Image: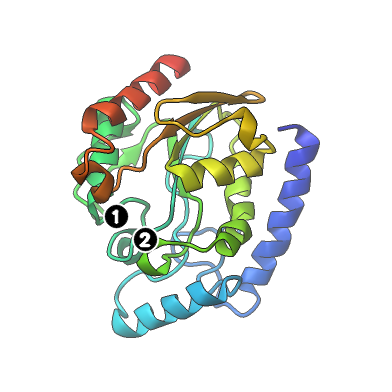
Amino acid sequence: MTNSTIEQKTKTIEQKTKESRRNSAGPSFSVSAQSNEPGPDCPLCPRLKDYRDANRAQHPHWFNAPVPSFGPVDAQLLIIGLAPGLQGANRTGRPFTGDFAGDLLYGTLIEFGFARGVFEARPDDGLTLVDCRISNAVRCVPPQNKPLPAEINTCRSFMTAAIGEMPRLRAIVMLGRVAHDTTLKGLGVRAAAAPFAHGAQHQAGTIRLFDSYHCSRYNTNTRVLTPEMFRAVFASVREYLD
């Protein structure tokens, strides 16, 4: 992705950020005022907004807002998931925190030196990411964990902004087909040139792309993804970055 492309996409995200905050109370407690993250009351996807409002009424003590990226902006590795889980990141406010997927992801990151501390499935557990950042293709929790194509398209500019603001980025791990497809579109890579397959690697300019099945409970329970398969992906990432 060229510098001019990044600049064009940055202008798009700035416009969408302003729109998402137009009727909001401002950034949430975990998002800086300078961030390109969506505001806590982002109205860009009506179905997701209605679902968020319903969850706020039913669970007023949950996070219930677009979940911001987690980890240092100067990291070399970015991990892109699907969307916050209802009782996971939507509840806690940190990606992959509070549901099963986080157990496998953070345990693997610790094993390969991309995280430090003890993962206790809560945002104040003290766990920190090392040269690694985590984001999602869609920032708000979708009903049945299934975002619509229009919602994925709308939220892509926030994902592209997360990529564009990382000056040292060298590798992206895409968890699942949705993350794969939207990342390719965000980077301007033709789908035919980079077909999805677990363990596959692709190149997008200076960024190496790594495919993995999503670390969801369903995928692991059905053995579509095993811990060994997941670790193999991050072993490849570690080798590439080292």
Instruction: Please indicate whether residue 45 sits to the left or right of residue 91 in the image.
Output: right
Disc 2 crowd rating (10 Å Cα; few below 14, some 14-19, many 20+) is many
Residue 163 got which mark? none
Tell me if label 2 and label 1 are in contact, CB under 8 Å.
Answer: yes
Please report the residue visible at 58 percent of the width from the left and 58 percent of the height from the top.
155
Please report the residue visible at 31 percent of the width from the left and 72 percent of the height from the top.
62
Please report the residue visible at 77 percent of the width from the left and 39 percent of the height from the top.
5
Residue matched to label 1: 123
Above or below: residue 193 compared with residue 125: above
The amino acid type of the residue labelled 2 equals: Gly
State which tag comes first along the sequence, 2 or 1.
Answer: 2
Residue 165 seen by the camera: no
- Compare residues 216 and 107 and report the one nearer the observer: 216
- Compare residues 213 and 85 and report the one nearer the observer: 213
* Residue 197: percent from left, percent from top: 44, 31
* Residue 235: percent from left, percent from top: 34, 20
- Compare residues 143 and 139 and report the one nearer the observer: 143
Name the quadrant of the N terminus.
top right
